[in-house]
Amino acid sequence: MSVENTPATAAPAKARVRRLPPEFNILVVLIGMALMFEALGWIFEGQSFLFNILRLRIMILQVSVIGIIAIGVTQVIITSGIDLSSGSIVGATAMVAASLAQSSDYTHAIYPHLTNLPAIVPMIAGIIVGGLGGMINGGLIAWTGIPPFIATLGTYVSIRGFAKWYTRGNPVSFLTPQFDYIGSGIVPVFIFLICAAIFHVVLGYTRYGKFTYAIGANRQAARVSGINIKRHLLLVYTIAGLLSGLAGIVTAARAQSGQSGMGVGYELQAIAAAVIGGTSLTGGAGRIWGTVFGTLILGVVTSGFTFLNINDYLQEMVLGGIIVGAVIVDQFRQARRAKV
């Protein structure tokens, strides 16, 4: 028998395959979809999809905001929870931050005596509002026992109502150049990647991460092991709110205005990015870089459909199918693990 066919050499080969990071398959899908749109672009449009720098730049900027939200949503889903309020938090924080970032040149400022403030002031205010929204979610879930779906659905409506009430539905414009800079150029991309790097380390190498995975995998076992589940859930949802608040600030800075309708539908896109990136809706599994790749997949699909002049209705149908497909794949993966 040849050496190549012996079980002793076959086993290490299998081990090498298994050592590939979980994000590898998601990255392959991302590359495959990009190449597919590149081929379709030449066939139907006679031009390149991948080598249009302006298109790629717009796509990456658009997905950066969703990615920032998705990093927080990923942590929530790992605990076997859900957050439907993140889009509303984006709208509320955009309004609050914009109201404190107005220029003194505008005679109808929301706060006439608080104009031309340093950009750090509206940033802090927006992040605080986001953190408070997340804290309310965490408190409701941890101390009342309300299911996360119901709790965050309620805050989804209430926080959106606050965003509309804050300026009676009027947009907030004439923001300072210093604040607008937060949303200019590739600054949102840097913010997204920095957040991803930070929480990759936090989830993978700290007690916070270990507790987050433990609660999602087996809540009873986590409680027996001494984890304060209520306090940790409060922290996880607060962090998700802080990241949604940061996304709201970037959104207002990019648009150079604050509007109560900002962030509508962002919560579903963030959940989709996390699920496509391998985060299990049953809890206990998920990685930040997988979410990053999932966010990019959403961006490639949306940008590719726009590039091919496919209408928005069909885009939504296909995106919905991708989400359902990702969940089905996760269910098969969970069932296979249970058999092992």
Image: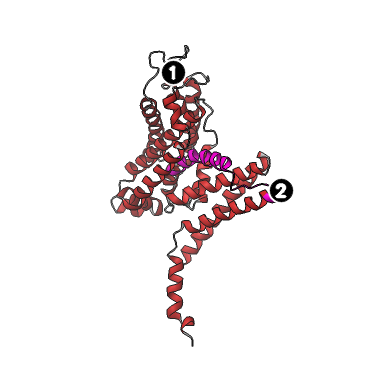
- Along the line of sight, the residue nearer the viewer: 219 or 204: 204
Categorize mark 2 by other alpha carbons within 10 Å: few (<14), some (14-19), many (20+): few
- Position of residue 197 relative to residue 242, above or below, is below
Question: Disc 1 or 2, which lies upstream in sequence?
Answer: 2
Residue bearing mark 2: 44
Q: Tell me the SS state at disc 2.
A: helix
| Whole-percent x, y for residue 143 in the image | 36, 38
Q: Is residue 240 visible?
A: yes
Residue bearing mark 1: 103
Q: Identify residue type, mark 1.
A: Ser
| Left or right position of 42 against 81 | right
| Left or right position of 64 against 303 | left
- Along the line of sight, the residue nearer the viewer: 216 or 245: 245
Residue farthest bottom in this picture: 1
Instruction: Tell me where the magenta segment starts and ends, as one range.
Output: 42-71
Q: Predominant secondary structure in magenta?
A: helix
Q: Identify residue type, mark 2.
A: Phe
| Left or right position of 202 against 30 | left
Distance in Å between CA atoms under marks 1 and 2: 47 Å
Queried whether the magenta region covers residue 64, the answer comes back as: yes
| Whole-percent x, y for residue 123 in the image | 39, 29
Residue farthest right in this picture: 44
